[in-house]
Every structure is written in structure tokens, then in C-alpha cells.
Image (tube, coloured by chain):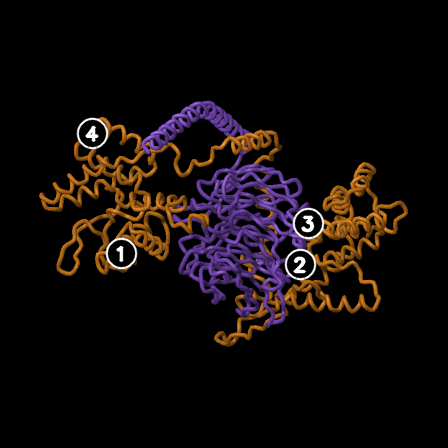
Amino acid sequence: KYLSTFIKTLYSTSMIFYSCVLYIICEVPLNETLAHLKTESETLKSKLEEERAKLHDVELHQVAEKVEGLGQFVMKTRRTLKGHGNKVLCMDWCKDKRRIVSSSQDGKVIVWDAFTTNKEHAVTMPCTWVMACAYAPSGCAVACGGLDNKCSVYPLSLDKNENLAAKKKSVAMHTNYLSACSFTNSDMQILTSSGDGTCALWDVESGQLLQSFHGHAADVLCLDLAPSETGNTFVSGGCDKKANVWDMRSGQCIQSFETHESDINSVRYYPSGDAFASGSDDATCRLYDLRADREVAIYSKDSIIFGVSSVDFSLSGRLLFGGYNDYTINVWDVLKGTRVSILFGHENRVSTLRVSPDGTAFCTGSWDHTLRIWA
Amino acid sequence: MTINTLAKGGCHREQMACFRKMEKVIVAMQDPDMGMKMRNQRLLITVIPHAMTGHDIIAWLTHKYRISEEESLHLGNMLVKYGYIYPLKEPRCLVLRPDESPYRFQVRPLSMSILPTFYNPAIYLAKKNIRKQGELMEYEKERYSLLHKRINHTWDFVVMQAREQLRASKQRRKADRIVLECQEQAYWLINRPPIKYECIEHIKGSSSCLCLQIEACRKALGRNRVKSSICLEGFLKYSEQYLNHDPIMQGCLPSNPWISDDTAHWTMNAEIVPVPTRLRVERWSFSFMELLNDAMGRREFMTYLEKEFSAENLYFWQACEDIRHGESSKIVEKVEDIYKNFLAPGAARWVNIDSKTMDKTLEGIKRPHRFVMDDAQMHIYFLMKKDSYPRYLKSDLYKNMLAKAIVPQETKKSVFPFMRRQRHSSPSPAQTATQAAEEEGLAKGAGANSAAGSHF
């Protein structure tokens, strides 16, 4: 008996010694390579900043001095949509300019006619925290997903008795939660972003993965498709504070911006497609120009302390709306960089904000269980 | 903010960013010169020292940040909600009242319970430093400087908290004070938390990640950039051009449906109308993409091209779009159709592509995939954009359209403003699609050949 315990202790101490030796042997060169790579990365980054700065001859607000200032802004809640039993996490507009789909923490996805405030369809997902939902361009289906790591498409049936869940189609599969999803120009393809650090493009019909996008070092929280002529790029933002622009065809990251100080919760293209805005936990929104390849504006104020959850532009791109975690909506003059208005109304944080397709109003969803239409 | 951290409820980056900013506000409020004027506040019969009124807080915030009173009230409420300031009247109700209610700065706010690892020992050492006027023990000095480096950004807050705690302790009885001091000293002697180099923010650092970053930087260094002045002018131009089309900026005619409950604006701007609105027709002239994205605009353009005998370009472009965005299973079939109709020698709608692109496309057709038509499609797109589109805008067809277009009358405000209009529902897109599919099914059943009508 003493022999066995003696052998055991001898074994364990030798294992510790062995692993220590191994640790010491491997640790040194690994650290050296890492340090070397780090310095190389840092030098290249500063070189890149130098290059970018060379062509930066003027600031946006300076160029905008000749533009007329905006007057008083009066926007009110025109509709309040009540019906969710828990925090509203995401919403999207239908192309018909009046219908919306919204998803919440309790697993419910509801399609509303926001104009009449009637609920038209409701689906209960098998998971909670449905963080992403999207309306199909045809208006005939919705996509949603969240903690189930999947993105599912539900065709919208007009038969009130039919259970929408019956026709559900599982399209995307990630290894962590789904943070955002969006249909591309048709009902046939979906773009998703996930907590597993990747984005992916899927074929709806077959569920096949068409392309995957790797490059973020942490959870990807948001994405937006470019409205450009060639329609081949999209931007994503993540917890690694980076906003990446991707080529959908090749899967390559073609541009990257890292100026935020915290997680990027929302990205949205400027209507012309030449720039995009981002909203982050560092309480700022920023505008990045794709041709100049740099950040060109920061929208922030000392009195704004809480993070931005969601951003969107008005139709002309002159206004930027931001939904904040302190329950408010701040309206920014994109060109002059000033805050035009602050809107109160929600009783908990604003989690999602989208302008309607024809720009007549915008919709916000909040943790106070409601959605509001503002105009 | 990610769901992982939300679900666990632990300390995370989002809260750190918020706390840092709130702490800045609190530090500013406590500034001896520019901060709040603290005085003795009366609570019933007791006099509370070193307190402030709700009214003063709001006035100070309004002045300092140049915001409205409503916003100051909101901001102040957040400070109370997160425990940086607490009410003396009704301490359970964490609300900022814009009146003479007394408030005080919290000595141990929420941030400290969430991030105890660094704050508490830092505050302890800072207190000792202040009391002993810099005479700390060797190991304490080391620890102090390490902590200072580690949480440098909130050091003001740490010092402020230390001062507050010292002030609060002065009001205790001597016996209690001595006991508490001894307790604290003993605690920190034993509980020396290790300071790891890896902090929550620097988790990335794996070599593969760095390699990717280096690769991306190298590529980025080689790209062409445009001068800022040119790019930024672009924003000005765009905003100006679309100003009249932005309902939130300029309103819309006859009225914004969400405000007036009248859907006339949507009816007038439906996908296909007998006469389009003037703004809509004007928009077709902003860019080629605007024209193609509008179903009516595209129809008009097609009519024009047919007159010019170059309609095959637009048909070709539409067919290519259909491949790019359509079902994967139909790609092969569609590519074949395109070849037969547009590319094969002697095809009915032969398109004029340069030989290099044609060769490349024909080669690619042998192994058809979603993007096989991309080059040819781009070529034809730019051909239309540079040639046919500008001529269309100068044509009589367009000018007549513009002249015919209606400018809706602005709806006069209702005589009875309290009467709410009835909000009518509209047919769901799903319904119209099902009906269309049914009709198409019937037509197909009858043997008729339905035109390539994909929804754009």
C-alpha cells in the first residue's frame, strides 16, 4: 500500500517536472515568435495610418461649413406596437414600406402591419434570444435565428390556421449564436454573422454554404449589404472593434477599419454605397469613407455615456439615427457632425433601429417590449 | 455587448466603457473649482453635510454639457440608477427629482463590486498614501505603481473614492475607526491579488490572428486611395441631390402616411401606376442604378431601347441578374438559355461583347457557376450606362414622361383635427404573390408560355 502511494507521488512529481521542463522549452521560442509578429503588426499598422493620413487634406465638418444648418426637428412616436412578452431584439422592414417583422427574447417572431398595428403572423422559435430577423425581398418569407446557432426561413402562409413552424426551413448552421442575418437581392440567398467570429453566405433552397468569411478575431455582431452597382460587397462589425468590408464572391476581406474603442454593435451603409456608419459600445458613431479608406467623422458628445446599439441613415443620408442603451435616440447631422435632436420615449434600452424603405419613418425596438414608429 | 456576457451577467467590456464615462462625469462634478457646490442639506430635522439638491445636479449638468433640462434629468437619472449618486429622501427609490431633495455621492458604487480585482486594493493603497503622505512600504509602493499603470484611465476616480472614504471614516467614533483600519490592513496583507499581464481586453494575440492582420495590412498599404476633399464633396452633393426626396427632411406629398393616416402617398408611388409622380421620374436621372431599380423606370428604358434596336442589352442584363440571385439548382439551365438566346452565333438577341470577354465567358460556360456571366454582364451594364442611358435622358420619351408626371397637392390639415382617419389595411405581399403564382399555374396548365417574369 505504501509502495503504491509512493509510486503515485513519484509519478505525479515527475509529471509536474516534465511538464515544467516542456513548458520552459516551448515557452521561450513561442514567446519570441509572438513578440516578433506583434511588433511587425504594429509597425505595419502605423505605416498604414501614415499612408491614409497623407491624402487627408480636409475634415468633413470643414467641407460642410457652406451647407445650411438644420432647423428644429420634431419627430414623435406615431405608432406603438405592443405584443411581445419580452425584450425586442431585432426588426426589419418589408419592401411594401409598412410591414415589419420583429423578434424577441422569449422566442417569438411577429409580423406586423405597422400602419394599422395589426399582428399578421406569429411564430414561436424553439430557442430564446432571437437576435436576428429579416424580411425577404418578395415579402413572402422571414428569416430568423439566435441562440439556436441557426438561421431558419419561414414562408408566410395566409391561412390563419396553418402553423408557420411546419414549413420552416433550416438554412444556416453556425457553431455559436446567430447575431445578424440579411437576404441578398432575392429570396434565394442569406448572409449571416455569428458569435463564432465568421460570416457566411447560404443558398436558401439547398441550405448549402456558398461562401464563408474569416477574419474577425471575436464575435461578429452586425452586417449590412452594399447598395452599389455591382452589389458584391458587404460590411461587418465585431467585438474585436473592427469593421471589415468583404467581397462576397471571393470571401476576401478587402478593407478593414479599427478606430472604435469597444464592440461595434451596428454597421450601415451610406445610401450612395461610398461610406458606412458604425455604432459602438464606446458611445460613438463613426463614418468611414471607402474611397479615402479612413474614418472621416465621429459623432459623440460628453453627455452621451451609453453605447449605441443600432444606427441607420435617412433617405438622403443627411441624418444619422442612433438607438442608445440609455433608452434614447440621438439624431445626428452627418455632414456637420452635430447632434440635431434627442428623442425620448422608450422605457428601456433601444436594441434595434431601421429607417423604412421609402424613408418616411423609422422603427425602433426596445427592451421595454415595444416597438415604436417615429415620423 | 455580446449574448455570452449578457447571459453570464459578469463584468464585461460594455459596462467598463460606460463606467469609465460616468466616472469622468462624477469626477468633474467633484472638482473643487468647477464642480458642484456641496452644502449642508436639511432632511426633516437633521442636517446632512456634504450634500446637493436634485435641482442643483440638473442645473450643473445643463450648464456643463450644454444640453436641455430634459436631457440633464435623463442623464442624472442614469447616474442615480447606477449608484454613483444616492438619494437621502426615500433611499429605495433610485430616481432623480428636479427639486430640493438631497443627494450624495456614493462611496462604494456598482463599478467596484463588478470590478473588485483592481479597484479595491487601489483605493486602499491610495487612502494609505494620502494618510501617510507617501510613506508606503516597499512592496506597497511597487503594487501602487503597478495598479496605477493598470487602471490609469480611472485613477482620478480611485483617488476621489479614497478621499470620500477617508472623509466618511473621520465621522466614525475613534474606537470604530481604529478597528476598521486594522481590519482593512489585515485583509489586504493576506489578499494580495496577482496582477496578470493578460487583461480582459488583450485576449487576441494568437500567431495565426497576427499573421492575418499583417497580411491584411500589407494588402491595404498597396491600395489606391482618393483624396479626402474629393470624397467628402461627394457626400455634400449626394445629400443635396436627394434632399427633396427625403421625407424626414422635407416632408412628402401629399402627406406622410404615418402622420396623417392617409395612404395616398403610397398609392401614388406604387410599383406600377398609370402616371408616376414628378419626384420619381426626376430620380431616374440621378443614376443608372436608380432607373433600373424602379420597375416603371426600367419599363420605360426598355421601350426606349426597343426604339433604338438595342433592347437585347437590357434583356441580357436581366437574365444575368436572375442567375446571380436565383436558385442554385437552376443555374445550369439558365446559363444554357443565355447562351442560346444571347451569345451563340446567330442568336435571336445577340449581344455585342468584346472578343476577350466573350472568349472568357464561353470558356466559363463549360463549367457553369453563379458568377460565370459576371464579366459579360458588367461589360453590357457599362455599355448601357455610358451610351444608352445619357441618350435616354435627353430623349423625348423621357422628357414627355417628366412633363406628364404629377405633383401631388399637399393635403390640407383636417378641419376636425381630433377625428382620426380610418387606417385601412393593405393586401399582404404574400397574398399577391400566391395569387400571381396561382394565375401563372393556370396559364401554364393551359399550355401558354409565361414570359421570363422574375420579380426584381
Relative to B193, say whether B350 is above or below: below
- Sequence order check, earlier mark of 4 and 2: 4
**Residue at the disc numbered 1:** B55
Find residue B280 and name its label. 2
Helix, strand, or loop for circle 1?
helix
**Residue at the disc numbered 3:** B287
Find residue B136 and name its label. 4
What is the three-letter code of the residue carrying label 3?
Ser
Q: Which chain is orange?
A: B
What is the three-letter code of the residue carrying label 2?
Arg
Q: Nearer the viewer, mark 4 or mark 2?
A: 4
Q: Position of residue B209 (x, y in %)?
A: 52, 34
Helix, strand, or loop for circle 2?
helix
What is the three-letter code of the residue carrying label 1?
His
The verdict on a common chain for dots 1 and 4 is yes
Q: Nearer the viewer, mark 1 or mark 4?
A: 4
Q: CA distance from mark 3 to mark 2?
A: 12 Å
Q: Chain of mark 2?
A: B
Q: Chain of mark 1?
A: B
What is the three-letter code of the residue carrying label 4?
Leu
